[in-house]
Image (tube, rainbow, N blue to C red):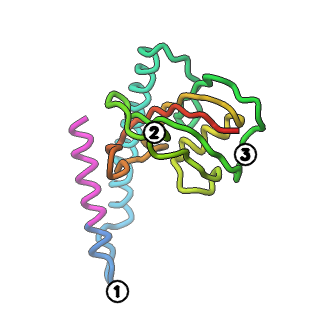
Amino acid sequence: MKQLLTYLALISLLLLQMACSNSGKNRKPVFSDQEMKNLQEPLVRVNQNLTEQDEIRMRKYAERMGWDMLQTKSGLRYMILEAGQGDSIQDKSPVELKYHISVLNHGPVYSSDSLGNKNFYVNHSDIEEGLNEAVQLMTYGTKARLLVPPHLGFGLRGDDWLIPARAILIYEIEILP
């Protein structure tokens, strides 16, 4: 894992150097097309490896907790705690939800109890992709638990406050009618 992160950091630095040194109009690219392809392939492998490790961690955590979760093609895991009786949620639907967010193995970070409910329009707001995906699988009034992998949450950076880089998130949500 350490080796993968070191490799990823080195490639990122090379790409950053390329971006900074190629800002002039008449400059030649730092890397040829073949060199870029050679850099891209290891990055894809590193990303696939990290995604596989995230999947294993989420699966094992859900098993330890006794959670019987469904999984989408994107890697989102979810379970309905209480089915809603409202309409299904579609693209552009307004959503208001109560929530509790925890980082896997690190505890709670955010809650509507202290920050207020989350309001957004599905796929048309600056909201985590995993949350957009999850609510479209549900109806208004649903209570659910989500395991959101980093690529559907806050990614490589985290949120620069309480959610660290590459965090797997646990959401407890209630979609208000």
Q: Secondary structure at mark 3?
A: loop
Q: Is residue 28 left or right of residue 134?
A: left
How far apart are the two marked residues, 1 and 3, measured between alpha carbons?
Answer: 48 Å
Q: Amino acid at mark 2?
A: Ser
Q: Amino acid at mark 3?
A: Gln
How far apart are the two marked residues, 2 and 1, measured between alpha carbons?
Answer: 51 Å
How far apart are the two marked residues, 2 and 3, measured between alpha carbons?
Answer: 24 Å
Q: Is residue 174 left or right of residue 157?
A: right
Which residue in the structure is indicated by mark 2? 111
The residue lying at 40 percent from left, 34 percent from top is 102
The magenta region covers: 1-16
Which residue in the structure is indicated by mark 3? 90
Which residue in the structure is indicated by mark 1? 26
x, y percent for residue 119? 59, 50
- Callout 3 environment at 10 Å: few (<14), some (14 to 19), or many (20+)? some
Residue lying at the far bottom of the rendered structure: 26
- Callout 1 environment at 10 Å: few (<14), some (14 to 19), or many (20+)? few
State whether residue 5 is above or below residue 38.
Answer: above
